[in-house]
Image (cartoon, rainbow, N blue to C red):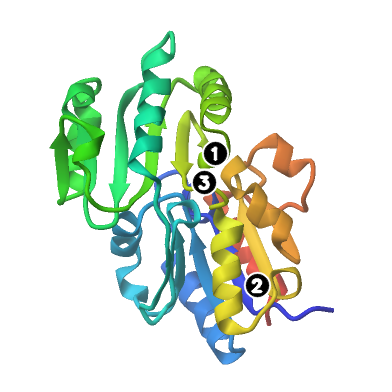
């Protein structure tokens, strides 16, 4: 039996419960066990670094991070192993696809830069509550008139539609962008667009190579959405959340409980002693 040395988990609707909380005492116990065994816990999320780290302040230096669906990879000790961005021309095409849709997004597109988060002035008023939330979450949020005003790597473009309209946008974006970008969704209407060949599995492979490990021998992974599909396929021990997307649940073993009852941590308890 292969030895588990890497445990990767998505956050929203996977590691987090529906209130965006997690069991910190239980998590600390899992980290202690992993440390003794020379293992690594990896947060593998579509979220950006700035929205992950504040939620894990008491565990700083104890988790590796695959953020922005694989665009950013950072070790527990803070070493940046990967940062891959989109080209401005491709982001301009992404916005053209959004404008071509016969329906508006629920709120304006968010561009995650290497140091700054951006929104277009023209879209910021689509949802004033979301605009206020973004300003609260991203202290470095800047409003711009045109995409070509961004002069740093654009790690991710995030746009949200009504759930039933998401696939129509994804299909058109994939057709238009082709191999120039990777278009994925975590569900609930949220679409992330990152650089080509970038996904959570890619980010985890960067970490595995860094640590001298293999995903198909040493990785256990947990996810609930379609942006977790590549990660689960690559893992030696993949687990879909009970509350997750039906396509994942049909293909992978289920975690022992759902996200509201510490399903990830309870499953990890059965994997490492």
User: On screen, 143 above or below 29?
Assistant: above
Q: CA distance from mark 2 to mark 3?
A: 19 Å
N-terminal label among 1 and 2: 1
Disc 1 element: strand
**Left or right of 266: which side holds 196?**
left
User: On screen, 28 above or below 91?
Assistant: below
Q: CA distance from mark 1 to mark 2?
A: 30 Å
Residue under label 2: 269
Image coordinates for residue 29, horizontal then vertical, percent:
51, 78
The residue sitting at 73% across, 54% down in the picture is 233
N-terminal label among 1 and 3: 3
Tag 2 near tag 3, CB within 8 Å: no
Q: Can I make out residue 131 in this image?
A: yes
User: On screen, 263 above or below 96?
Assistant: below
Nearer mark to the viewer, of 2 and 3? 3
Residue 13 disc label: 3
Residue toward you, 57 or 18: 57
- Location of residue 273 by image quarter: bottom right
Image coordinates for residue 76, horizontal then vertical, percent:
42, 78
The residue sitting at 53% across, 87% down in the picture is 35
Image coordinates for residue 111, horizontal then vertical, percent:
30, 41
The residue sitting at 32% across, 74% down in the picture is 58
Disc 3 element: helix
Q: CA distance from mark 1 to mark 3?
A: 16 Å
Residue 184 disc label: 1
The residue sitting at 47% across, 34% down in the picture is 191
Nearer mark to the viewer, of 1 and 3? 1
């Amino acid at each position: 039996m292969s030895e588990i040395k890497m445990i990767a988990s998505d956050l929203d609707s996977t590691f987090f419960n529906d209130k965006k909380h997690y069991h910190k005492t239980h998590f600390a116990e899992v980290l202690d066990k992993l440390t003794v065994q020379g293992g690594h816990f990896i947060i593998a999320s579509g979220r950006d670094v700035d929205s992950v780290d504040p939620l894990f302040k008491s565990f700083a230096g104890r988790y590796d991070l695959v953020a922005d669906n694989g665009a950013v990879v950072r070790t527990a000790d803070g070493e940046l192993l990967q940062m891959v961005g989109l080209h401005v021309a491709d982001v301009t095409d992404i916005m053209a696809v959004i404008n071509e849709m016969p329906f508006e997004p629920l709120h304006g597109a968010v561009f995650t830069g290497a140091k700054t988060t951006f929104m277009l002035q023209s879209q910021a008023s689509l949802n004033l509550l979301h605009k206020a939330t973004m300003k609260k979450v991203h202290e470095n949020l800047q409003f711009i008139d045109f995409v070509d005003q961004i002069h740093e790597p654009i790690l991710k473009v995030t746009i949200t539609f009504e759930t039933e309209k998401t696939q129509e946008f994804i299909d058109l974006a994939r057709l238009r962008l082709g191999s120039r970008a990777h278009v994925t969704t975590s569900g609930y209407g949220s679409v992330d667009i990152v650089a080509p060949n970038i996904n959570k599995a890619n980010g985890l492979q960067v970490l595995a190579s860094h640590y001298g490990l293999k995903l198909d021998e040493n990785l256990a992974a947990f996810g609930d959405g379609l942006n977790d599909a590549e990660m689960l396929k690559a893992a030696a021990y993949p687990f879909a959340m009970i509350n997750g997307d039906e396509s994942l649940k049909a293909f992978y073993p289920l975690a022992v409980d759902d996200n509201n009852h510490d399903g990830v941590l309870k499953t990890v308890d059965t994997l490492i002693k």
